[in-house]
Image: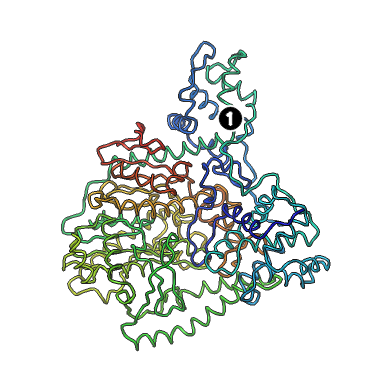
Amino acid sequence: MTQPSAPQVRAAVAGAARTITPTWPLTSFIAVNPASGHLRRPMQALHTVPGETPTRPEHEYLQGDVDLGVLRTAVAEVLPALTTADDLELAGRRSTALDVAVAALLHPPVDAASASDPERDDALDPVDQYLSQSLARFSADPVWAPAPGTGLFDRFRQLAGHDRTVPKRARTTLLALPTTAEAAIAEVLRANGIGAASRAAVVGAQLHALPGWASHLAWRAQHTGDATLTDLVACRLALTHALGAVVDVPAVDAAAPASDRVSVAAPDAGWVERTLRLCVGDTTHEPAPAERIAVSRVLRLLDPATRTTVWQTATETAYRDGLMATIARGGPADTVAPEARLDVQMVFCIDTRSEGLRRHLELTAGVRTFGLAGFFGVPLRYTSLFGQQPREQYPALLSTGYEVTDQAVDAAAARRARDRRALAGAVRSTTKRVASTPASAFGWAELSGWGTLVADLVRPVTGNRDGGRIPTPDTVLDVYEQIPLDDRVVAAEAALRMTGLTRFAPLVVLTGHRTETVNNPYRAALDCGACGGNPGGANARAAAAICNDPAVRRRLAQRGLSIPDTTWFVAAEHETTTDRLTVLDRHLVPDTHRETVDRLLAAAAVAGDALTAERARDLPGAGERTSLRRVRRRATDGSEMYPELGLANNAAIIIAPRAITRGVDLERRTFLHDYDPAADPDGSALTNIMTAPLIVAQWINAQYYFSTINPERHGAGNKTVHNPLGDLGVLAGHTGDLRAGLPWQSVAVGGRLLHEPLRLSVLIQAPLDRIAQIVAATDALRALLDGGWISLHARQDPHQPWQRYRAAGFTTDERNPS
């Protein structure tokens, strides 16, 4: 057997790695589409990938209410051939192929209605058990990490080769292997008789045996460079070989491209007969052979994968129909008294939670709101006044940001505050060290969990990520020194034109968002994804400083975008667990605008109360009678499993002027990005929106979607048994694979779903030819649309019906109201 070369090994690993999605560490946890490695195929093809599924079990769809018109539309969308098929002659009655399919879906084969076992078996075989423990040591504890110049595999080989818990013969075999990962893989493949035809399948099996660790090492390879997926393949193959186990060739290569269709057996005879009798309306009818054959031809298309795809499409169609009808009805008339109206414009993140506060502020204070990605077009590497290292506050689509730092206005006050933080920092450091250092035998896993609990419980007293209850001295960001003027002008113009904000009120508030929660390793998942899983206040402060810069304003005026001298930009943060609004850098607000800021905060308090009461109806353990104080106390309750619901139930993104949704209750399910085509004559702003915020919204949607429908593979399990491994992720208990995705409590309470898993619906109000050109020029958008990962509806103005985008162009969907 010829031994493969290093380039051949690297090619095999690279091919298998295409289906691995990198997962961010806990402190910068951001949304990813866990199935992004399969985007080159239709989403329905995930049915053919081992361990994957693109839909819920069929019995779950059958439990809900069914709109026959919606179901019929879904069948036509998934199986368009049935719309042109010949009618069937059944017992002297004519039935369309769609009629037959709908009847069959409502009464599927008997076994389709049975529930499957939702429990996950976290037990690993000895190879994966030992390997998972070893990777935890290497990744979370510097003592075990590879030395500079050595690879993760060589470190594993050396340590496992001297570990007396490993059989002596296996230790000898490990130490005899080459020191480089590529050479070790090649040697094991040769020794086990794995030829070129099976190489890719074997390599892929190693990665998919521990998908959580594979996702983490994929991120690590890109960001720290101290470990690679080749190391993981080498470690698992080497250990399997050393223990004398057979390196199997999998029957199905999990890393191979999925087929577009599932192989289909002949439909069950009983199902055929039952469907036929339903269509003719006679339960005693004895079908003729020709009738059986005709019905069988239709049912052959309704294999289990296709049936669940139709049901999933129907639930999404029903939601989208309702959303469009709600938009068409519009909101209530403006009832804010003229004397109570605030001459304020507020720019919020497009986050679904911001939709609620925007709606209540417009109803109670008459302010005008806008939606923009929450980093406000200013990517930062931000170091707070007492921060030890910069935070990467920019979307994952970007690779870097501007280095900015907080500068104290009063140096003496800063020194006093620093001294007060010294003791608090010591407490946190000690507890975190316990929480993030797994012992070699994993005997301290429980202690690590308790350490994290103690650290989080003391945070409200000792200070949270930005200081907590210890006051932070006034600061300014060194934006002018660190961001060139030309870049500041470009950022300001792009942000303002993208939202259509070209006429200005005296006060413009750029509002980021943050979440405060304790004893929650996944707290970053509740912060701003556009800010790298961090609070968005720093980006809002930087953007406000840029827009207040006289030099920037002069340049903008030359470009036809004039900001009056009487307009002042301020930064704020919406705390999403308590719905409180905080104005940042108040020491910079001119005297002329302080009264307006005070009035805004008073109005925001009223709006926040209304939003908290609204959210309480959905929070497990709360309800309409729960006091606002008790709901807000969840932010500092270390035992609370549901401090808030995050972006659960997200289902759509609307890219349009706020006018079409103002006053409309969108139930905190939509991302809202303002867009005014008149302010974007060349289409550059729409291009930026569709190729960045839209893509990120799909990532968020997909992460919630797959954490709900496939929690065994793409979820993080139950919070109550989480053991954090430092910053890397969590284990479910003491052992097992590193868990990726969202905790079950992010999407459900017990067996009841809090998140309805729907693929993202995209609604855009803009010229259709402009949208089509952007899609045609963007590979990522075409893959999402052509593969059925998202749907796109658009219209040029409110007087036209929504049209559905398909590969052949836009077509009018008569079901949807204008």
Q: Which residue is mark 1?
A: 108
Task: Classify 778 as above or below 68.
Answer: below
Quarter of the image for residue 343 reads bottom left
Kind of residue sitting beneath label 1: Pro
In this view, the residue in front, 532 or 642, is: 532
- Residue 248 locus on image (x, y percent): 74, 51
Task: Classify 424 as above or below 230.
Answer: below
- Residue 204 locus on image (x, y percent): 65, 52
The answer to whether residue 352 of the structure is visible from this angle is: no
Q: Tell me the residue at 54%/69% (across/down).
A: 224
Q: Tell me the residue at 31%/56% (across/down).
A: 371
In the image, 752: left or right of 264? left
Q: Residues within 10 Å of mark 1 (few under 14, many from 20)?
A: many
In this view, the residue in front, 488 or 356, is: 488
In the image, 722: left or right of 369? right
Please count the marks in the image: 1
SS for callout 1: loop
The answer to whether residue 567 of the structure is visible from this angle is: yes
